[in-house]
Image (spheres, rainbow, N blue to C red):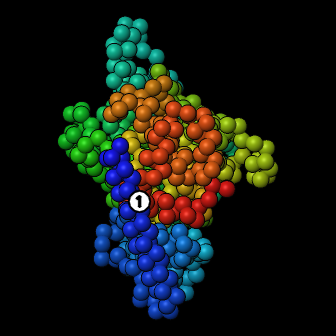
Amino acid sequence: MFRGRIRMHTCRIILFTSLVWFLLDVAVLFYYSDSPTPSRGNGIAGGNHGAVPQNSLGILGAQAAGAHPAKREILDDSSGNAVNHFGPASLPSNHKDEVIEMDERGFSLKYAKHELKKWVPAAVVPEQAGSPGEMGKPVHLPADQESLMREKFRLNQFNLLASDSISLNRSLPDVRLEGCRDKSYPAMLPTTSIVIVFHNEAWSTLLRTVWSIITRSPRELLAEIILVDDASERDYLGKELEEHVANFPVPVHVLRTHKRSGLIRARLIGAKQVKGQVITFLDAHCECTEGWLEPLLARVAENRKIVVCPIIDVISDESFEYVTASDMTWGGFNWKLNFRWYRVPQREMDRRNGDRTQPLRTPTMAGGLFSIDKDYFEEIGTYDEGMDIWGGENLEMSFRVWQCGGELEIIPCSHVGHVFRDKSPYSFPGGVAKIVNKNAARVAEVWMDRWKDFFYEMNPGLIISRQPVSVCYVETAPSFILILIRASCPYLW
């Protein structure tokens, strides 16, 4: 009990000290934001232009108080000139006349012209007639391989024999709506870096994911593919993987964690290294289809605060058949904070004038596959590093986007297949339920205001952990920054 009092007293001291520094930061930033001197920007042009720097307490504190963030300068890949995404003052001289639309906090909603690249559509992957799984067809193994198939199924919780029999660059049907095939997109679009986290992933599914990205993406828009190995234990995912991807036609980088970090922290490791303007997160067992990337990047280019997801089609865990998902569902959740798919309501169809090819505004996302502007990802605080391993990060990011001035959409003209499994093949320290419940409670405490009471009504067993979750966020800086952001991001959306 005495130790508990000391811990609570320590939390209060940390909270009070942090608030004092926060108020001092706000005062300083207000002083500089009112000054007409253009040279007071917080430039980082001399740093690594590929990294997504962590938000400073001062910048986010100013945003929480309604102030303009300090100016940030990012090196442009092509010109080497410093580009200020928060105003035209720092644009290179040949772009000074360009007017960039900004929001009320000074965040530029559009890309400068020199940040965009011309592109041409990727060629269609030809069918290898007679080969297993071509055009997304199911693979049927002979009866004498049934026992071996079941034995290997346990390794990844999908039919590894079927996957290994399919080409790494198999053909897929064009599953887009008819109206999507005729759509045109801007001749110049931002580039993207693909971030994929994997742990003990099968060779064939991981490499098929990578090859589907390379062969079905406009090469000019694909800055790189970043593979983050979250402490895999299988030998083929070590040096063999690095050597295999070294000569791919697109830069493929393999990063590694020193210990099991989980999806959230591993994605942040990858995000800090990206060079493209847009970060696209994908899972390690996906297949991108024809024309998947252009609609996503085109929508982000319209407004950098829009976060976009493709239609997530189903790849059978038994036969690897490619099955098209419905474009008439959107993401939601129940009061236990479980993600669920629900039918799109009529009001959303009316907003889109009945055009099913138009972007679909969704309350939440599944979380495995989405694209987000790199600077906006940083602007809203990236992921919450206080969440462990996996679970709840999709709702946390969804709430964060909507409550902090962004929009979340599903783009019906973009399709990516995903291997859906009945259960996870991975073990988690402490057990899956404990980690998922802890993450869910953290989401409720940070983002749901008084509506978190509904969560605890549905999860009475978590009430005992409520006090530590709500009070001791101040023990780590990233968590405290979250609370500062929440000051101006109400749940009433």
Which is nearer the eye, 11 or 477?
11
In which quadrant of the rendered view does residue 161 lie?
top left
On the picture, is 20 further left or further right than 183? left
Where is residue 188 drawn, in percent x and y? 53, 66
User: Where residue 113 sits in the image (x, y, percent)?
Assistant: 52, 74
Callout 1 environment at 10 Å: few (<14), some (14 to 19), or many (20+)? some
Q: Secondary structure at mark 1?
A: helix
Left or right of 476, for residue 307: right
Number of numbered discs on residues = 1
Q: Nearer the viewer, residue 486 or 372?
A: 486
Q: Residue at x 52, y 38 (%)?
A: 463
Left or right position of 219 against 359: left
Across and down, in percent, residue 94 comes to 47, 86
The quarter of the rendered structure image containing the N terminus is top left
- State the residue at coordinates (38%, 14%): 150
Q: Is residue 313 above or below residue 34?
A: above
Q: Is residue 408 left or right of 136 when viewed as pictured?
A: right
Residue 125 seen: no
From this view, report whether residue 480 is shown above or below residue 442.
Answer: below
At x 50%, y 57%, the residue is 372
Viewer-closest of 203 and 338: 338
At label 1, which amino acid type do we have? Arg
Q: Is residue 315 visible?
A: yes
Give the residue pinned by disc 1. 12
Q: Position of residue 307 (x, y in %)?
A: 56, 56
